[in-house]
Image (spheres, rainbow, N blue to C red):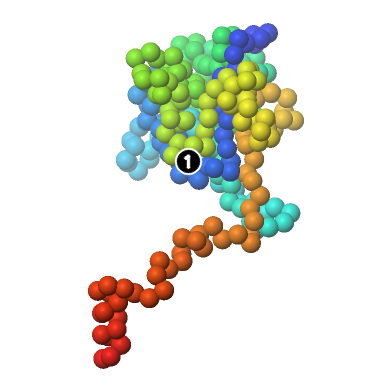
Amino acid sequence: MTELPERTDRKLGLVIDLDTCVGCHACVVACKGWNTENYGAPLADADAYGADPVGAFLNRVHSYEVQPESGPAQLVHFPKSCLHCDDAPCVTVCPTGASYKRGEDGIVLVNEADCIGCGLCAWACPYGAREMDPAEGVMKKCTLCVDRIYNENLAPEDREPACVRTCPAGARHFGDLGDPESAVSQLVESRGGMDLMPEQGTKPVNKYLPPRPKDDQIDVLAPLLEPVAEEPRGFLGWLDRALEKL
């Protein structure tokens, strides 16, 4: 079995704002595109446009309708991928050492050359974040785009996970959650960031920011729907007056 490092120098991970995520799936598409063509053995797809398509995704977005104790129901979009847990059961259960957690940055990875596709890590993960590549028969997962974040050939603004770089709503944030002064740690502190299923004891590095309560008395679109003029002017005003006389 694989052993976890006693400590990691950093805790790279994601902070996902459930209040901001609009469920557009741009992060899913960006993740699929980047990982199909790059790191390690790429995600394999077969018969993509046929009757029986086969493929793998490392990032998904689920949508739920939530009814608060007061106020209207809310639609919450919930992105989910590997949470790079401090106490990752997917690592300790691996019989070949293929799954491992890096001591330098805390990222959980899979050495696909050693993976035998037994699926034990998928059974051990309480979040369902592992994905068996059906074409290659090995386990794959979110790598935090390790081939992007350390790639000096990319512009500095591109050295972050593809999902973070692509999110049009700014709902995904990337950084060192082991540094209390980092931007992501400050965001978690200010917004009451939370762990997913803390009762599992996995100590996930990724955090979620809860959705803010919605006020059903406020119509945010109302100011945008007000008429720009009480009466039509110019040519349209003349046309309106002419038509009234017919």
Give percent across and percent down for residue 64.
59, 48
Residue drawn at (62%, 17%) of the image = 179
Q: Quadrant of the N terminus?
A: top right
Give percent across and percent down for residue 82.
56, 26
Is residue 238 among the parts visible in the rendering? yes
The one of 145 and 232 positioned closer to us in this rendering: 232
View extreme (bottom): residue? 246
Residue drawn at (46%, 60%) of the image = 224
Q: Residues within 10 Å of mark 1 (few under 14, many from 20)?
A: some
Q: Quadrant of the C terminus?
A: bottom left
Left or right, 149 with respect to 3, comes to left
Residue 91: quarter of image: top right
Residue drawn at (34%, 37%) of the image = 48
User: Relative to 244, is 170 above or below?
Assistant: above
The one of 20 and 108 positioned closer to us in this rendering: 20
Give percent across and percent down for residue 72.
65, 58
Is residue 31 among the parts visible in the rendering? no
Give percent across and percent down for residue 141.
51, 24
Residue drawn at (66%, 49%) of the image = 213
The one of 93 and 116 positioned closer to us in this rendering: 93
Mark 1: which secondary structure? loop
Numbered circles on residues, count:
1
Residue that badge 1 annotates: 169
The three-letter code of the residue at mark 1 reads Ala
